[in-house]
Image (cartoon, rainbow, N blue to C red):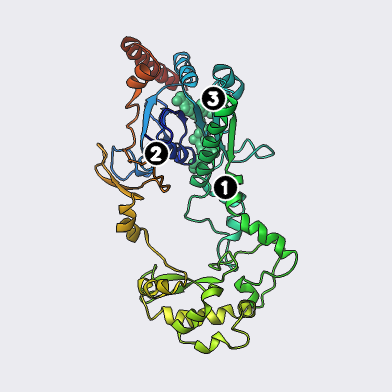
Amino acid sequence: MKALDGIKILDFTHVQSGPTCTQLLAWFGADVIKVERPGEGDATRKQLIDVPGADSLYFTMLNHNKRSITIDTKNKRGKEILERLVKTCDVLVENFAPGALDRMGFSWERIQELNPRMIMASVKGFGPGKYEDCKVYENVAQCAGGSASTTGFRDGPPLVTGAQIGDSGTGLHLALGIVTALYQRERSGRGQRVLAPMQDGVLNLCRVKLRDQQRLEKGPLKEYSQFGEGIPFGEATPRAGNDSGGGQPGRILKCKGWETDPNAYTYFITQAAVWEKVCDVIGEPEWKTKPGYAKPVERLDKLNEIFARIEQWTMTKTKFEVMDICNPLDIPVGPILSLKEIAADEGLRATGTIVEVDHPERGPYLSVGCPIKMSDSPVEVKRSPLLGEHTDEILTEVLGYSKEEAAELRTVGATEIVKRQAAE
Ligand code: CAO
């Protein structure tokens, strides 16, 4: 048994944000039925192609454990099938551009008429307001949600991060909204709308930066390296390079081999509780009691000097040796791992966070499995569906059409989409 066994998801998502959400729900046991356009499907199927003719890694890595049905929802018969799906499913998840679902004839009001228990969950770029009609991709959300202005170095431009906090981050937010709405439905008997705007999701993850914005109004941010460097603060939370975002100062420091290996670095945190051990490890035992160094607040204007000294030590060790020495002493450090190293990590493979999946078109590939582990709801990662692979079984087994009707619906859908494309 899985946590979401028996829950049917009408997955009307595409690209990354929505598919991340429905993939998680599938891993938790929901039956996720991905509705795609005949002939094309999710645009990511054919984006960033590495194996000619096969679904891309972009698609396969975001759509595990789902079933795919192709329906042209712009024709009459397609709309009929979609209506049946709305009546049958518990949740509709979508991340179309604003207004697309209304134009298709499936407004929230219409969905409630068809199925009052339906939970309708959407990702949009922005919430209600002046930007609500905008189309949004990952980096736009990172910029509008406060991340880009606070990422990077003070003397450089704003930076986007590699972690897909706008897309996958918002998908996570949406998944939480959906399961919470399912829980409420148990008691209310009613569905509801769930909206996760990408700007809001990124801002939620940048919460500490809004904390700093307000602290800045009361005085300089003493844990930022710019304070120790004597550089005045402006009006807004600045970019803080690799400074730690919390109350325990930290930096990225070079390790042995940094001259040739771009990832021979470690993160190093001088947590107050282990300051004395840090001093011993780097060979500065007198700093344990020296005025100006002994107490955390006294050290704030000397962080550059302190981290430069720690770096002299880390440069004599590999990033893994730093970990091996500091970890037993409870000094928080972390090697900068490349994706090559992560792909080979035996620990991540053992827990199923890195998985090898087989695919009929592309053969075996690596993917990220479910990052959330539940003791009573195990996850088995299954390959993503081929386009329309489950159309017949969904029409017959889920929606109750006869085999003949299903065969006819397939032809009608295909014919009508060709006609429409010709007309366009
Ligand atoms: N049959 C027929 N038509 C279909 C269909 C189907 N099965 N599935 C979708 N469509 C149609 C929709 O009806 C819509 O058509 P109209 O514009 O004519 O109403 C169109 O396909 C959907 O298009 P879209 O505008 O959503 O797609 P796009 O590629 O132009 O834009 C994106 C993509 C991501 C910018 C936009 O969907 C968006 O802003 N989504 C919300 C925010 C979001 O999730 N962004 C992150 C995406 S991941 O990086």
The kind of residue on which mark 1 rests is: Ala
- Please tell me in which quadrant of the rendered image residue 406 appears: top left
Residue 278: x and y in percent read: 48, 79
Q: Is residue 146 above or below residue 403?
A: below
- Please tell me in which quadrant of the rendered image residue 287 appears: bottom right
Q: Write the residue at 35% across / 18% down.
A: 397
- The residue carrying mark 3 has its beta carbon less than 8 Å from ligand 1: no
For disc 3, the marked residue is 118
**Distance from Cα at disc 3 to Cα at disc 2:** 21 Å
- The residue carrying mark 1 has its beta carbon less than 8 Å from ligand 1: yes
Camera-nearest label, 3 or 1: 3
The one of 226 and 46 positioned closer to us in this rendering:
226
**Distance from Cα at disc 3 to Cα at disc 1:** 28 Å
Work out whether mark 1 precedes mark 2 in sequence or the reverse, and give the earlier one: 2
- Please tell me in which quadrant of the rendered image residue 382 appears: top left
The kind of residue on which mark 3 rests is: Met
The answer to whether 34 appears left or right of 98 in the picture is left
Work out whether mark 3 precedes mark 2 in sequence or the reverse, and give the earlier one: 2
Q: Which mark is residue 141?
A: 1
Q: Write the residue at 57% across / 66% down.
A: 156
Image quadrant in which the N terminus is located = top left
Work out whether mark 3 precedes mark 1 in sequence or the reverse, and give the earlier one: 3
Q: Which mark is residue 27?
A: 2
